[in-house]
Image: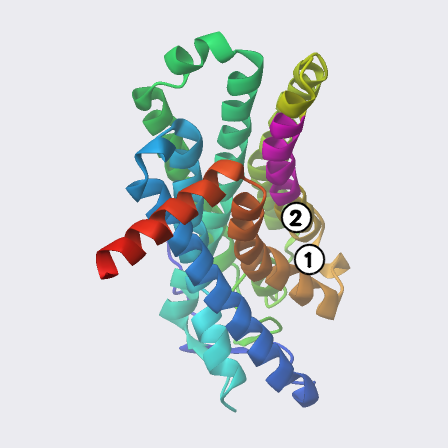
Amino acid sequence: MNWANESSPKEFVLLGFSDKPWLQKSLFILLLISYTTTIFGNVSIMMVCILDPKLHTPMYFFLTNLSILDLCYTTSTVPHILTNISHNKKTISYAGCVAQLIIFLALGATECLLLAVMSFDRYVAICRPLHYVVIMNPWFCLRMIAFSWFTGFSNSVLQSSLTLNMPRCGHQEVDHFFCEVPALLKLSCADTKPIVAELFFFSVLILLIPVTLILISYGFIAQAVLRIKSAEGRRKAFGTCGSHMVVVSLFFGTGIYMYLQPPSSTSKDWGKIVSLFYGIFTPMLNPLIYSLRNKDMKEAFKRLMLLTFYYKK
């Protein structure tokens, strides 16, 4: 993989919204608040899921992995974006751009697969409750997590190599906040149609297949929930699955918009906003959605706070 070809600059200029200086301060504050909330929320979920024995179940094991993913996902881009917004020189080294691209793609793809795994977990819990412990055994859960991470990074290496090996003829101004495939493809001085077709194929595998499996799972879940006679049981099932579907809709909807259409058809500013949404704001919303709409999580938080307060006394 000859990523550093003869047309590779030593650094890239990340334009972001540099043509809108009046927006810089507001954007900096918004991103800082979002990133701080993301860190606090996801770290809190990780601590509660690890420290509370009652949450040592497959559902919360997957949720812990989602929190780890979201922390790394946002950290791969947000600190550098904040630095660039607060400085006149908005650059990133070539090596930094490569690392950012690989990590962002890998974690994004892994999250797509993890959300599908989480939907399967909910399907088994609601539609096959008597077989849940047997099917969702620790070894099977670990294998699904390992498969998600391995596939995510494999997809990232493939997409990154295709993108970075395109000739750029010295072009180094990336009209984006960070190094992402659609923005980097616009720098190419060669015909990108063959590469775009290959990238489209990989994106279909990573985006459309998981979201299709998720929708099928929740179709079966909806049928099973409607057969529950207890109104409380239906409410609890819909509450748990509803929070997952909100995450799925936000993450996959914006991801499909960016990656399953030609780069040239993406509106210049709208593409940047969408990328910020699934790359920064969705990871911030995940802990809020999963904790505020989850009775077990709220009770676990209370127990952890009481325990912390007791030991302080």
Q: Residue 54 is drawn in which quadrant?
A: top left
Within 10 Å of the Cα at label 1, are there few (<14), some (14-19), or many (20+) other Cα atoms?
A: some
Q: Amino acid at mark 2?
A: Leu
Residue sitting at 27 percent across and 54 percent down? 310
- Label 2 sits on a secondary structure element that is helix
Any part of residue 138 in sight = yes
Horizontal side, residue 176 vs residue 82: left or right? right
Horizontal side, residue 3 vs residue 189: left or right? left
Q: Quadrant of the C terminus?
A: bottom left
Residue 174, x across and y down, in percent: 57, 73
Residue 184, x across and y down, in percent: 56, 64
Horizontal side, residue 223 vs residue 278: left or right? right
The residue to which callout 1 is attached is: 263
Which numbered marker is on residue 250?
2
Residue 295, x across and y down, in percent: 53, 38
- Compared with 168, 152 (above or below) is above
Q: Amino acid at mark 1?
A: Pro
Mark pair 2, 1: CA separation:
21 Å
* Region rendered in magenta: 235-248
- Compared with 33, 228 (above or below) is above
Within 10 Å of the Cα at label 2, are there few (<14), some (14-19), or many (20+) other Cα atoms?
A: some
Marks 2 and 1: which is nearer the front?
2
Horizontal side, residue 103 vs residue 243: left or right? left
Q: Foreground residue, 221 or 255?
A: 221
Q: Foreground residue, 72 or 134?
A: 134
Any part of residue 8 in sight = no
Q: Foreground residue, 129 or 206?
A: 129
Q: Is 163 covered by the magenta stretch? A: no
Residue 121, x across and y down, in percent: 49, 24
